[in-house]
Image: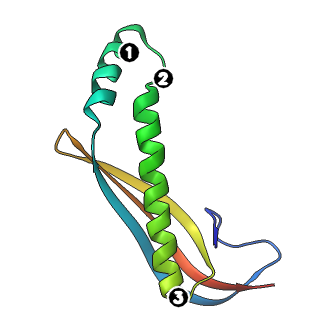
Amino acid sequence: MLVTTMNDVPGETITSVIGEVSGLTVRARNIGAQIGAGFKALGGGELKGLTLQLEQTRAEAVARLVEAAQAQGANAVVAMRYDSNELDQNFQEVVAYGTAVVLSS
């Protein structure tokens, strides 16, 4: 399934707009990554443990977005965006959302 941040797809025609779809995940922060991030913050640089955790969280949100779009008969999602929020100090919410469509060449 094509998932794009663009509003249209060059060379393709949107033949049907199904509607908004989303994929949501909420994860507890990894205590090991948090401790490592605390030490890393002293010297600066990338927080690799937290970067990996966020990449995994986004991938899970997109996978759920794709499942929702496929369940409604879409073959693509356009105008995909992410939104994230911190719930409490230990939980991270990420939502991927966009418009489910049917494309044809």
* Residues under numbered marks 1 and 2 in contact, where contact means CB atoms less than 8 Å apart: yes
Q: Earlier in the sequence, mark 3 or mark 1?
A: 3
Q: Residues within 10 Å of mark 1 (few under 14, many from 20)?
A: some
Structural crowding at the residue carrying mark 3, measured as other residues with C-alpha within 10 Å and reported as few (<14), some (14–19) or many (≥20): some
Q: Looking at the image, which is closer to me, 78 or 38?
A: 38
Image height of 104 relative to 4, above or below: below
User: What distance separates the C-alpha of mark 3 from that of mark 1?
Assistant: 45 Å
Which residue in the protein does label 2 denote?
46
**Residues under numbered marks 3 and 1 in contact, where contact means CB atoms less than 8 Å apart:** no
Residue 44: which quarter of the image? top left
Across and down, in percent, residue 53 comes to 41, 40
Q: Pointer 3: what residue?
A: 18
Which badge, 1 or 2, is on the more N-terminal residue?
Answer: 1
Local secondary structure at mark 3: strand
> Which residue sits at x=48%, y=17%?
45
What kind of element bears circle 2?
loop
Label 1's element?
helix
Above or below residue 45? Residue 99 is below
- Specify the amino acid type for callout 3: Ile
Please identify the residue farthest to the left as the structure is shown.
88
**Of the residues shown, which amino acid type is indicated by label 1?**
Lys
Q: Is residue 68 above or below residue 62?
A: below
Mark 2, Cα crowd under 10 Å, few <14 / some 14-19 / many 20+, is: few
Q: Nearer the viewer, mark 3 or mark 1?
A: 1
- Relative to 31, say whether 62 is above or below: below
Residue furthest to the top in view is 43
Pointer 1: what residue?
40
